[in-house]
Image (cartoon, rainbow, N blue to C red):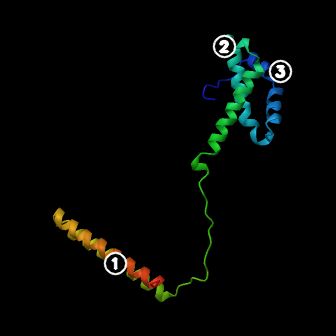
C-alpha cells in the first residue's frame, strides 16, 4: 500500500469490471464484509495498478495477481492486529472494600514514608562525601540489613514449620 497512487481512468474502469473478485475473496475466506472490505480493497487496487502498469504480468490471469495481493493485505492486517502492543494482557481491577484504613493508620503510614524519604535524602547527602570503598561497605550493610528484615517479616507472617 506504500506505493498506492490515484487511479487513472483506465484503471478505474478495469477495477469496476473485476470488482466481483473482491466479493468472492471475502466470501471464500469467510470474512465479514463490514470488517474486512477496507483491508482487502487496497490489495485489490494495488493489483489493478500493478497489472496495468507492468506488461510482463499480462501472461498471468488478473485474478491470480489480485487474489495474492488481497491475501497479502489480510496477512499484514493480522500481523498489525496481533502485535504485542495491541494485545497486551489486561488485568481486572477489583477494589477490596474490606481493607479500609482508619485515619490514624493512614497518618502513621504517611509519617513512615516521610521518615524513609528523609533518611534516603540524608544518606545520599552523606554518600556524596564518601570514597568508593566506604560507599560499598555502607550499601552492603544496608542490603544485608534489608534481607534480615525481609526474613524476619516472612517468619512473622508465615511462622516456622517443623518437620
- Which of discs 1 and 3 lies nearer the camera? The answer is 1
Is residue 99 toward the left or the right of residue 123 in the image? Answer: right
Q: Is residue 47 left or right of residue 80?
A: right
Residue 54, label in figure? 2
- For label 3, the residue is 17
Residue 80, labelled with which disc? Answer: none
Residue at screen point 22% across, 65% down: 136
Which residue carries the number 1 mark?
148
Q: Where 50 sits versus 81, above or below? A: above
Side (left or right) of 92 relative to 36: left
Percent position (x, y) of residue 122?
25, 73
**68 to the left or right of 125:** right
Q: Position of residue 127 (x, y in %)?
A: 21, 68
Q: Nearer the viewer, mark 3 or mark 2?
A: 2
Q: In the rendered structure, which disc, 2 or 1, sits on the residue that comes first in sequence?
A: 2
The answer to whether mark 3 and mark 2 are in CB contact below 8 A is no
* For discs 2 and 1, the disc positioned in front in the rendered view: 1
Q: Earlier in the sequence, mark 3 or mark 2?
A: 3
For the point 79% across and 31% down, the residue is 25
Name the element at disc 1: helix
Find the distance from the CA under tag 1 to the CA under tag 3: 79 Å
In this picture, is 137 found above or below 21?
A: below
Amino acid at each position: 500500500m506504500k506505493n498506492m497512487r490515484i487511479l487513472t481512468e483506465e484503471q478505474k474502469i478495469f477495477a469496476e469490471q473485476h470488482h466481483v473478485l473482491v466479493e468472492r475473496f471475502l466470501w471464500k475466506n469467510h470474512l465479514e464484509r463490514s470488517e474486512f472490505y477496507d483491508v482487502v480493497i487496497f490489495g485489490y487496487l494495488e493489483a489493478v495498478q500493478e497489472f496495468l502498469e507492468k506488461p510482463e504480468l499480462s501472461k498471468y490471469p488478473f485474478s491470480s495477481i489480485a487474489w495474492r495481493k488481497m491475501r497479502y493485505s489480510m496477512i499484514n492486517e493480522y500481523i498489525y492486529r496481533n502485535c504485542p502492543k495491541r494485545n497486551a494482557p489486561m488485568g481486572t481491577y477489583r477494589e477490596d472494600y474490606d481493607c479500609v484504613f482508619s485515619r490514624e493508620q493512614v497518618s502513621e503510614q504517611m509519617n513512615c514514608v516521610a521518615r524513609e524519604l528523609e533518611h534516603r535524602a540524608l544518606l545520599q547527602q552523606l554518600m556524596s562525601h564518601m570514597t568508593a570503598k566506604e560507599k560499598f561497605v555502607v550499601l552492603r550493610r544496608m542490603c544485608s540489613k534489608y534481607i534480615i528484615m525481609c526474613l524476619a517479616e516472612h517468619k512473622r507472617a508465615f511462622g516456622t514449620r517443623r518437620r
